[in-house]
Image: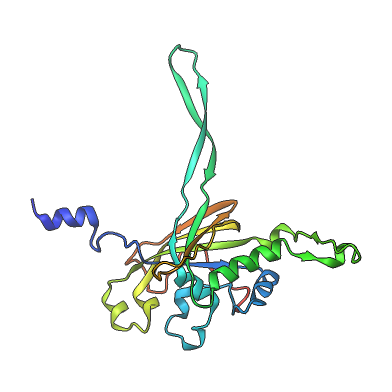
């Protein structure tokens, strides 16, 4: 047996997938995006972060920065709930599937000097639970929380798993990493919003990067895939980015 043939059979011509090549983006509604930008963030609703690499006028794009600072992303799986049907013969039961339950999505962010992820997530929650004195009695200094509509504070989160494109023409004419990498699987979390933001811990010990986690609810996920090495270098999965904000 040839070891090279075994390797190609198990790992394929291009080897195993890389765990550190991915990108995320938040496709926010315009009103939510405008509210978050009041905290000093520039266009937090990024569309296809890898597209902006090598483009100098996009280096301050907060959506691109959020993708860079996403230190760990869990691409959610799912579980299947089942029931049991007792057959007419004793001892023969059938477990049938009836519901698919999607797991929660957890993203761990590193905190930059501008505290971009913290501002982004806090701005998102403030939009959801904003307090306004005009809905209470001024003399009593009461405040009421007015919830926006569901479609206003939810958005699609897109997680791209990208892999290097080893084709000769992709590397020969590459201007940026977008030309040398391709999205192989794109997971879209539909109507997501953050429901748990972990504590940001600081201490007087040795200096180290600050890392915190955020957990998101969503309705369901969509997985689009593309085969590496098939088609042109501009091929994309079926689900396109919703370029409502930056267009």
User: Where 67 sits versus 56, above or below?
Assistant: above
Which residue is most to the top?
A: 90
Q: Position of residue 55 (x, y in %)?
A: 46, 85
Residue at left 32%, top 77%?
Answer: 170
Is residue 238 at least partly visible in the picture?
A: no
Residue closest to the eye, 189 or 127: 127
Residue 236 found in image quarter: bottom left
Residue at left 40%, top 71%?
Answer: 207
Residue 117 found in image quarter: bottom right
Image quarter in which the C terminus is found: bottom right
Residue at left 71%, top 57%?
Answer: 150
Residue at left 13%, top 58%?
Answer: 4
Which residue is most to the front?
A: 204
On screen, residue 127 versus residue 220, left or right, reads right
Q: What colour scheme does the image use?
A: rainbow
Which residue is most to the left?
A: 1
Q: Position of residue 6 (x, y in %)?
A: 15, 53
Residue closest to the eye, 215 or 207: 207
User: Where 12 sits versus 84, above or below?
Assistant: below
On screen, residue 174 versus residue 67, left or right, reads left
User: Where 9 sits versus 100, above or below?
Assistant: below
Q: Position of residue 214 (x, y in %)?
A: 53, 59
Residue 20 found in image quarter: bottom left
User: Where 95 sits versus 135, above or below?
Assistant: above
On screen, residue 119 versus residue 237, left or right, reads right
How many discs appear?
0
Is residue 53 at least partly visible in the picture?
A: yes
Q: Position of residue 94 (x, y in %)?
A: 47, 24
């Amino acid at each position: 047996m040839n070891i090279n043939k075994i390797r190609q059979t198990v790992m394929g011509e291009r080897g195993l997938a890389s765990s550190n090549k991915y990108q995320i983006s938040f496709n926010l509604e315009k009103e939510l995006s405008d509210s978050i930008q009041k905290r000093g963030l520039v266009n937090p609703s990024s569309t296809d972060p890898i597209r902006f690499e090598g483009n100098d006028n996009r280096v301050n794009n907060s959506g691109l920065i959020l993708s860079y600072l996403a230190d760990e992303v869990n691409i959610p799986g799912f579980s299947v709930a089942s029931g049991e049907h007792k057959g007419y013969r004793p001892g023969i039961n059938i477990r049938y599937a009836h519901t698919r339950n999607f797991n929660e999505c957890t993203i761990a962010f590193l905190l930059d000097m501008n505290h971009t992820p913290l501002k982004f997530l806090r701005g998102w929650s403030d939009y959801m639970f904003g307090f306004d004195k005009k809905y209470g009695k001024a003399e009593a200094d009461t405040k009421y929380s007015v919830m926006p509509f569901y479609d206003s504070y939810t958005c699609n989160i897109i997680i791209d798993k990208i892999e290097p494109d080893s084709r000769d023409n992709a590397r020969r004419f590459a201007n940026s990493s977008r030309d040398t990498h391709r999205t192989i699987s794109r997971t879209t979390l539909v109507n997501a919003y953050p429901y748990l933001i972990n504590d940001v811990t600081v201490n007087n010990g040795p200096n180290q990067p600050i890392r915190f986690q955020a957990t998101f609810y969503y309705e369901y996920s969509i997985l689009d895939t593309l085969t590496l090495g098939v088609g042109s270098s501009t091929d994309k999965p079926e689900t396109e980015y919703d370029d409502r904000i930056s267009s």
